[in-house]
Image: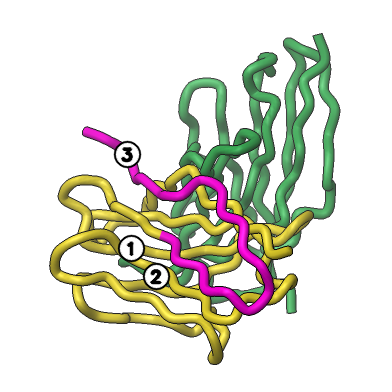
Amino acid sequence: NAGVMQNPRHLVRRRGQEARLRCSPMKGHSHVYWYRQLPEEGLKFMVYLQKENIIDESGMPKERFSAEFPKEGPSILRIQQVVRGDSAAYFCASSPGQENEQFFGPGTRLTVL
Amino acid sequence: DQQVKQNSPSLSVQEGRISILNCDYTNSMFDYFLWYKKYPAEGPTFLISISSIKDKNEDGRFTVFLNKSAKHLSLHIVPSQPGDSAVYFCAPRVGGGADGLTFGKGTHLIIQP
């Protein structure tokens, strides 16, 4: 059973470009979470999704950021018009449902030049 | 507003000795507490958890203690091994189910040979 997969592992964008981060949850997991880790900080919750639904986006910036988890395919975290402050490691986690443990992917390190 | 505090950014322990990592929280609604371990360039890995109805949970070399009145928990690792060198995050949550986690900033544990 493959773990949570994220790609790309590293992404470099110039200011003003768009960044798309992909997450494939573990097989059988229908709950996906996105977290962001800034340098020297802990992981900060951004958004929680189930298939085709956003359940909780309380941690996501109101502008430029969006997330989806379509019926087919991976979950996508999209950042429009990136700024230098968006440079961070973005982690995706999945869980099978009403469970307390979340399984994390290896992360995508976004660098904005 | 830091709901979860890990006040020691780093901790150095000799191999074979006990490592004690501390975590304080302010939100009295937290009732389930998880510890994650993270190696560089990898995602966090679940280590051990404890429910608020318990004050101790043990799993092999790892024991977590919870003092609800003090809003404090600690992770004990004994004996410490070189492979334990990693960043440890405390991640409490509110309620059961599938909410996003709140992470502390982490403690970098270094096991000295």
| Residue holding disc 2 | B99
Q: Where residue A14 sits: x, y (%)? A: 66, 68
Q: Amino acid at mark 1?
A: Val
| Residue holding disc 1 | A32
In this rendering, the label closer to the viewer, 2 or 1: 1
In this rendering, would A32 be left or right of B55? left
Using the image as rendered, state which of residue A29 and residue A76 is in the foreground.
A76
| Residue holding disc 3 | A3
- Residue pictured at 64% horizontal, 39% vertical: B75
Chain letter belonging to callout 1: A
Secondary element under disc 1, as helix, strand or loop, is strand
| Spatial separation of the CA atoms under disc 2 and disc 1 | 10 Å
Q: Dot 1 surroundings within 10 Å: few (below 14), some, or many (20 or more)?
A: many
Q: Amino acid at mark 2?
A: Asp
Quarter occupied by the N terminus of chain A: top left
Q: Colour of chain A?
A: yellow
Q: Dot 3 surroundings within 10 Å: few (below 14), some, or many (20 or more)?
A: some
Q: Where residue A8 sits: x, y (%)? A: 46, 49
Using the image as rendered, state which of residue A56 and residue B49 is in the foreground.
A56
Q: Colour of chain B?
A: green
Which range is magenta?
Answer: A1-21
Q: Is residue B83 above or below residue A24?
A: above
Q: Quadrant of residue A50?
A: bottom left
| Spatial separation of the CA atoms under disc 2 and disc 3 | 20 Å
Secondary element under disc 2, as helix, strand or loop, is loop
Q: Earlier in the sequence, mark 3 or mark 1?
A: 3
Q: Where residue A10 sits: x, y (%)? A: 56, 48
